[in-house]
Amino acid sequence: MKTKTQRFITAISVLILVGTPGVAFAKYSIPADQLQPTKIYYGTSESFEKPGKVRFKDIIKATPEYHEVKRDKIERGTGRYWILLSQASDRANRAIHEVGEKTDYDLIALDGYLGHLKPAIKADDITDLVIETMTESLNKK
């Protein structure tokens, strides 16, 4: 049996935790039976508050590697084609991670994935932000 003092301390502790900025309780999580890890680019599916979504193909199309494929008319299926697309994918993933680290977006997933979950999870489209971040990184070099 708790004493009055113990109950008081417990109540105060709860109030402090609830009212303290930075101490947050997860707003969302993805049910294990609906989890598709390949559709999550940044963050953890068990606990997140501010989800973002990206159109990954659009980010790839904004990379210099993709532009090289188009400009030089590199044939699909060739070694050079796959090397450039792999580099474009790496660049896109780095930009997504950079946005995740620099913003409040604590989960970034493929466009359409979160919206099709049961229940659906609304996410901001941050594709343009990722492309902008990637372009800024390229311009710094």
Image (cartoon, rainbow, N blue to C red):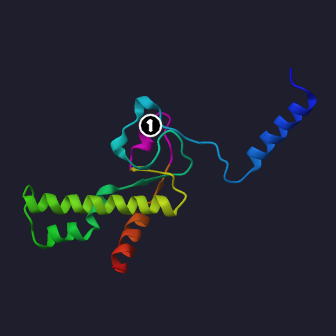
Residue drawn at (74%, 45%), measured in percent from left and top? 17
The residue stretch that appears in magenta: 111-122
Secondary structure beneath dot 1 equals loop
Label 1 sits on what residue type? Leu
Q: Main secondary structure of the magenta part?
A: loop
Give the residue number, with chain letter if any, for mark 1: 117
The location of residue 76, given as percent across then percent down, is: 9, 58
Q: Residue at x 79, y 46 (%)?
A: 16
In the picture, the quarter occupied by the N terminus is top right
Residue 23 x/y as whole percent:
67, 48
**Placement of the C terminus among the 4 image quadrants:** bottom left
- Residue 73 position within the rendered picture, expressed as x and y whole percent measured from the top left: 9, 68
Q: Is residue 22 magenta?
A: no
Q: Is residue 23 above or below residue 90?
A: above
User: Going 14% across and 73% down the picture, which residue do you hit?
Assistant: 71
Residue nearest the viewer, comparing 63 with 23: 23
- Identify the residue at horizontal 21%, vertical 66% (top origin): 66
Question: Which image quarter: residue 113?
Answer: top left
The spot of residue 33 in percent (x, y) is: 41, 29
Query: Toward the viewer: 65 or 9?
Result: 9
Looking at this view, name the residue that lies furthest to the top. 1
